[in-house]
Image (tube, rainbow, N blue to C red):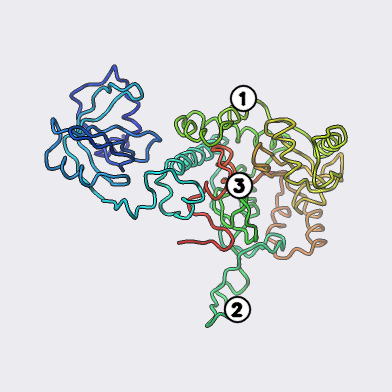
Amino acid sequence: MHPFKFSRTPIRLIIKEDKHNIKNDRKITVCGWIHTMRKQPQISFIQLNDGSTQNCLQVVVSPDFTNASDLEIIKEKGTKGVSIRVEGKLITSQATWQSVELQAYKIQVYGEVDPKTYPISKKKHGLDYIRQNEHMRIRTQVMSAVARVRNVLSRATHSYFQTLDCKYVHTPILTTNDCEGAGECFTVTTQYPTDETPVRMYPKKELFKQPAFLTVSGQLHVESYACALGNVYTFGPTFRAENSNTSRHLCEFWMIEPEFCFIEADELFAISEEYVRYCISSVLSNCEDELKFLSRLDNDLLPRLKIIKERPFQRLTYTEAVDVLQKEETDNPDCQFEEKVEWGMDLGSEHERYLTDRLYKKPVILTHYPKTIKSFYMKENKEDTRVVDCMDILVPGIGELIGGSMREDNYEKLSTIVKEKGIQGLDWYLDLRKYGSVPHGGFGLGFERLVQLATGMKNIRDVIPFPRYPKHCKY
């Protein structure tokens, strides 16, 4: 079955045309938005973009071949942001920076723009400015480049896990599990105050008859499917009610959480590395123009991505990392951490960035953290019971990208841990270990951080279409 064909031709396909193979009588139709229009007395040039590519198609407008009434209208109304439909002839371009251009026969104006009020004007705007116009910022070159890279990463994610025969599972957004009582969940309620005074929740009046929350992770739910389907993954929205206003945190973001049965820790570590490299390789192969543009904002972007694609990640145990960092503190006068490195601590971003950005200059897989600083479900290491079989993948410029582990699959052990920690409402989760338990493990990846890695964007708010963070939930 052949895919549906639109009446218009995407500019992405047109600009790939080989100028030596152009048929000069070929008529095509394109639609898009005017990026720039250079008006001259006789001949005018429109740079047209339809969102399919980073590049624009040059449309030539002239009384020699353009409909007279259309020519008059476009000269009057043609400005940045105006949407148009163009019918014309594709010809070989004389310009060295493009292979083809379009001679416009007919031009139809769809949507006009008042340049005096249009927030995305001709001049260059900083990211802080365009962030104030979330609904319009996608019309800028930088945000459209990020969006196309994000799309490629989404496609690569599904492609990679489907290749591993993982089944895509939609885990619930509404849940009664509050993430081990972490206190960072959004509560969902059907009870509304009649004034500004908060109303205490009464479960008997609630739709679900008990407290419900927006999910902070799909992991626990997807484990139930893994224990029947073998290999699964979830890719969906998650929420944190953390009052953090940094450039690294969002209240709503997307997570990818695969889960694999009948697997060992080393296999899990290898899959997580291969997945990241697969995604970055896909971006390098499919987003050449976008990466060239984004490299203007980050000169080291392309070299950094090529290192990720071509070189194996550095592997260290948590204990080895602590030893390395302590030695750096002692021997290197340029290494001064605000927080002294000690075994048993949860390494801070300054320690993680030192390993990735200064010491190894590539991603680092840290394994076998102390169990006292990790989640209750992580499996205790057989050789060293102080640590669990887990890993974090740290990447340059960002820090933690992935966190994962083998899961405790012994019912008695996990039941004891849950009771000791006073965790409620997980009887269903324990049942997975009670009936036909298997060794299994998985990881979680914050998708926006992966987009940051691939685009070089410094603020996480610039890699998601409509960012939600403390005191900010527009539209």
On the rendered structure, is 200 left or right of 97? right
Amino acid type for the residue under numbered disc 3? Gly
Between the residue at mark 3 and the residue at mark 2, the CA separation in whole angstroms equals 33 Å
Name the outermost residue toward the bottom: 194
Q: Is residue 50 above or below residue 111?
A: above
Q: Name the residue: 62% across, 54% down.
A: 217
Residue marked by disc 1: 310
Q: For mark 3, does the 10 Å Cα neighbourhood hold few (<14), some (14 to 19), or many (20 or more) residues?
A: some
Between the residue at mark 1 and the residue at mark 2, the CA separation in whole angstroms equals 55 Å
Is any atom of residue 252 visible in this view?
yes
Residue marked by disc 3: 446
User: Could you say where residue 34 lies in the image, as x and y percent from the top left?
Assistant: 30, 42
Residue marked by disc 2: 198
**Upstream in the sequence, badge 3 or badge 2?**
2
Q: Quadrant of residue 96?
A: top left
Q: Name the residue: 65% across, 58% down.
A: 244
Q: Secondary structure at mark 1?
A: helix
**Marks 3 and 2 in Cβ contact (< 8 Å):** no
